[in-house]
Image (tube, rainbow, N blue to C red):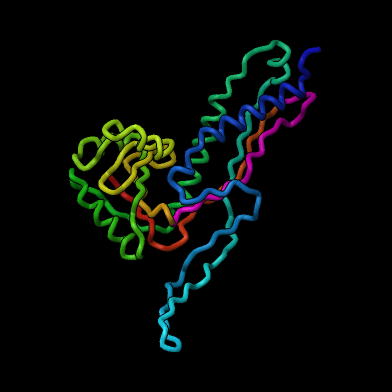
Amino acid sequence: MGVSLESWLKNLEDKITTEIQERRSYDSYFFRTFYDADPFYIWKHDLEPETITRRGATITRIPSPKIDLVTPKIINLEYSGNWKSLFEEQRIVHINPICKEAILKEQAAVVETLMKDIKEVKVESADFIEIRRAQEIIESHDKFADILLIHPITLTLLLKTTNFRHKSMLHPYFVESQGKDYVGELGTLSVFWTFGLPKNVGLMYNKGSAYLRIHPLDIGFDSYVEPKVLRIFEELYAWFDKEDVGVKVLF
């Protein structure tokens, strides 16, 4: 007995879901990524720790983080086609373009929410001395800048400076430990690329303050009898848990 149309469609849904999940690289440059179905809430440490003296002892009081509900970015893709004919004719369905578009939409949404209301620093010199100025903004808030996200084209600029060490110059075990999309080190910054950024724009931040929440992918056909549309739906939101721990860098 052959495979039914419904089984074929559900198998296709599973393949696309798995492929998108395996292409994700966010765990490499976020402190934590939440893959859950909780409401979209974030927390921020708006208040600084308070030092008080009580009964001769010095106590540091850590304020509770402020929790807010936020409106997530929505990704809603639809792919029309004569899916039933593809099944009946046993034709190969190329899922790579579908998965690639979904990942590009994810990357753009991640960067858009992460870069809300952050300061900018223009890098104008060939040796990138302004990078240090961006790091100082973050350090002034008791955080250490350790991540730099760039568009792949920006990598050509980094290769021209002696401060940058491409991953080909580093130990393979170290490179592997950094995760996907890792391209090298710029001083004390671990550099990763993403198509979610505009060309010649970077995002520098403290990894320990970066969080991402993604609801589970909702992938399905409009019908398992007469399928016409494949839909990919998801919601996500990225944020820093403290103000001024991220800086937009213009190259």
Please say if 17 is above or below 95. below
Depth order, front residue of 83/205 = 205
Q: Specify the quadrant of the image occupied by residue 4.
A: top right
Depth order, front residue of 182/99 = 182
- For this orientation, the residue located farthest to the top is 89
Depth order, front residue of 149/139 = 139
Q: Position of residue 26 (x, y in %)?
A: 48, 42
Please say if 242 is above or below 216. below
Q: Specify the quadrant of the image occupied by residue 154.
A: top left
With 177 as the anchor, is 43 left or right in this view?
Answer: right
Q: Position of residue 95 (x, y in %)?
A: 58, 24
* Location of the N terminus (image quadrant): top right
With 185 as the anchor, is 208 left or right in this view?
Answer: right
Give the magenta part as a residue range.
209-227
- For this orientation, the residue located farthest to the front is 56
Find out whether residue 225 is within the magenta segment: yes
Q: Position of residue 185 (x, y in %)?
A: 29, 42
